Image: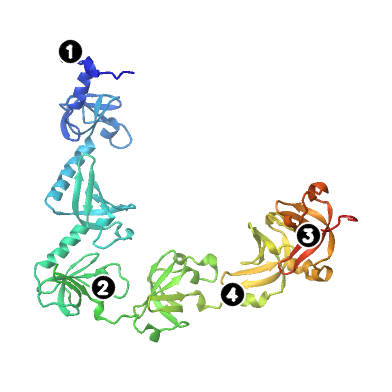
Amino acid sequence: MAKKNFNQFESKENPTEFEILLGSYENMNSRGLVRQGKILNIDQDYVYVDIGDKSDGIITIQEISSGGNIDITGIGVGDSIEVFVGSYDDKLGYLICSREKAKNAYALDDIEKVCSDNETIKGVVTAKTKGGLILDLNGITAFLPGSQIDVKLTRDFDVFLGKTLDLKVISVDKKNCNVIVSRRKVIEDEIKKLKENVLTDIKEGDVLEGIVKNITDYGVFIDLGGMDGLIYITDISWKRISHPSEILSLGQKINVKVIKYDEEKHRVSLGYKQLFDDPWQNITERHKPGDIIEGVIINITDYGAFVELDDDVEGLIHSSEMSWDKKQSDPKNLLTKGQRVKAYILSIEPDTRKLSLSIKRLTESPWNLLKEKYTVGTVVEGTVKNIYEFGVSVELEPNIEGYIKQNDFSWTKRTKHPHELFKQGDQVKAVVLSIDEDKQRIYLGIKQLTESPWSQIKEKYSVGSVITGTVSNITEFGIFVQIEDGIEGLIHNSKIPENFISDNNITKGSKINAEIIMLDVNEQKIGLSLINVSQDNK
């Protein structure tokens, strides 16, 4: 098909209706701007506004109204109204306008000025995303990327939720109402100010006197007389703190240690905790596993509670060490922040600064008593409480359960699922096989109540003897033969003559003679062969 040449339809003297509309659409100059308009008409859906462009604009009644009820009291045809002009709607034939966005546009003008003047603006963190934080800048939503939160890599965004931050505006997209901000630039500017007065004789390891000049959530600036230095929050105290103001205050005179001095960039990193003994030094001389200590709960998480000892060392009580009763091991239900507790030291790792503590080990394990009551070999009775895919639990007494694995049900019966043998509420008798104190589980067995049929197999059968059995199953790899109740042997395909099954019309239930070629009582396996075995007198 020949390609149409649309130019052949053009006529400069007589433009088509389509060309007029196209020219009108392309010459709409108001989009993305705030315009003073005049109300032309109002119906139940829209307010129609003349904005001095090729096309008129419309505003939805819902935006004009306040609340849930339609109420346009206070405006009328002929009134002036300020609107933000959006995109052109081909179906409606109007420019989509907004009065709310017009108000935001002025706020964005102010933010744009803050950006151009390189000024600082405050914002409140309202939410977090995978890539950063969402902030409110006096009604305007802004985004703080994760890379712009701090000069250091920030992984925990939760600590900033609800906080008011000092920020620099990186970019403003007024058309799409997108504002990007940076806290990192504020911190970098603070650090940059340290270059103003340089001490030429400063060196790492020096102890200097200074005055706390400014406190931020990431550290403290110290006036050293000739220049400023920064103590990061991690170098203020050996113990965990959430804010520098917990230790230091404005105007306080303190001694600090020079940790690092960058002569080229004129940056001084200071330490305060380095002037005090590290509480982890010689900790094994003060504490050892088995000791009972006291401390204060300083933080509670889903996985445990942190305890601060009187010597500023922190330890963790894991949730598994809260209570002997696993159902009562939620730290938030057992402990409160600020509570003073006693704990048992499980282990001390000075190199990794880990101290593992326990509350439950302050009392004797109830499982020690159970070991005496339910000794291995004891016959018990109980009620089937739960049925699982590979076993059942049996309630022996209130809050004490035993577990029977599927392979401990019977010596002879094969089951695909415990539901075939049990239902909830069944009374069962079993024997105690073992007790696992760590898992808090008593293992039981039913088949162990009777002697294994395999215990006398070697007395009944021997390798080389020929037996007569019943075909119990025919598989791709061989024939299973039941020799007696609960005892099966396998004739592998390699030990079956060619066409034996079809020639002898062998099916499930057929009688068959076979030679024992392997006998393993421990593995409960018997290997059989049909090679050179007569099938007469079956």
Q: Which residue is mark 1?
A: 14
Q: The residue under label 3 is which amino acid type?
A: Ser
Q: At 15% across and 74% down in the image, what residue appears? A: 211
Is 517 on the left-hand or right-hand side of 83?
right
Question: Between disc 4 and disc 1, whose residue precedes?
Answer: 1
The reply to whether discs 4 and 3 touch (Cβ–Cβ < 8 Å) is no
The numbered disc on residue 366 is 4
Across and down, in percent, residue 480 comes to: 76, 56
Across and down, in percent, residue 365 comes to: 56, 76
Which tag is nearer the camera, tag 2 or tag 4?
2
The reply to whether discs 2 and 3 touch (Cβ–Cβ < 8 Å) is no
The reply to whether discs 2 and 4 touch (Cβ–Cβ < 8 Å) is no
Q: Which residue is mark 2?
A: 235
Location of the C terminus by quadrant is bottom right
Question: Between disc 1 and disc 2, whose residue precedes?
Answer: 1
Q: At 82% across and 51% down in the image, what residue appears? A: 509
Q: The residue under label 1 is which amino acid type?
A: Asn
Q: At 72% across and 59% down in the image, what residue appears? A: 426
